[in-house]
Image: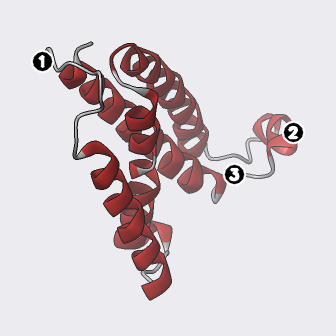
Amino acid sequence: MNLRRGFTFACGSVLLVSGAQLGMRWSMTRLPEPAQWLNAISQGDVSLSALGVVFAAILAYALSMLCWLLALRDLPLGRAYSLLSISYALVYLLAASLPVFQESFTLSKTLGVTLVILGVLTINSRRTPGSRNSA
């Protein structure tokens, strides 16, 4: 097992899936319902940039899954799955920080995200019994 490589791929997966989530959110506020896309496209009544971001987000999801599969080769499941939680915090922080999303920070959400991050740090702060760090 190469924990450093696994951690790198897991972080790549988190960044890609977080970007995909934000891209989907941005796009879906600018597009009609998906069932109406073909009709809207044929009438020229659709934002091509928003549609492009949807497809880019889908590609980011696919790349995220590839990174995730590579991460699972080298990380124990408990550590790997805890790292996925970072995406919740990242999406919240970016959505509330960037004006384009019109989200806001709240005490309860910030406390929840803080607890998630503390949990991830706790799970990943010690070596797992039986694992060897070959990084």
Determine which residue is flagged by label 1.
Answer: 135
Q: Name which residue type carries label 2.
A: Asn
Is 23 on the left or on the right of 34, as rendered? left
Please identify the quarter of the rendering in which residue 4 is found: top left
Determine which residue is flagged by label 3.
Answer: 31
Report, in whole angstroms, how far the alpha carbon at label 2 lies from the one at label 1. 53 Å
Q: Looking at the image, which is closer to me, 105 or 120?
A: 120
The answer to whether residue 16 is visible is no
Residue located at (69% from left, 46% from top): 46
Which one is closest to the eye, mark 2 or mark 1?
1
Report, in whole angstroms, how far the alpha carbon at label 1 lies from the one at label 3. 45 Å
Report, in whole angstroms, how far the alpha carbon at label 3 lies from the one at label 2. 12 Å
> Which residue ends up furthest to the left in the rendered image?
135
Q: Looking at the image, which is closer to me, 119 or 59?
A: 119
Determine which residue is flagged by label 2.
Answer: 39
Q: Name which residue type carries label 1.
A: Ala
Say what secondary structure mark 2 lies in: helix
Say what secondary structure mark 3 lies in: loop
Q: Looking at the image, which is closer to me, 85 or 93?
A: 85
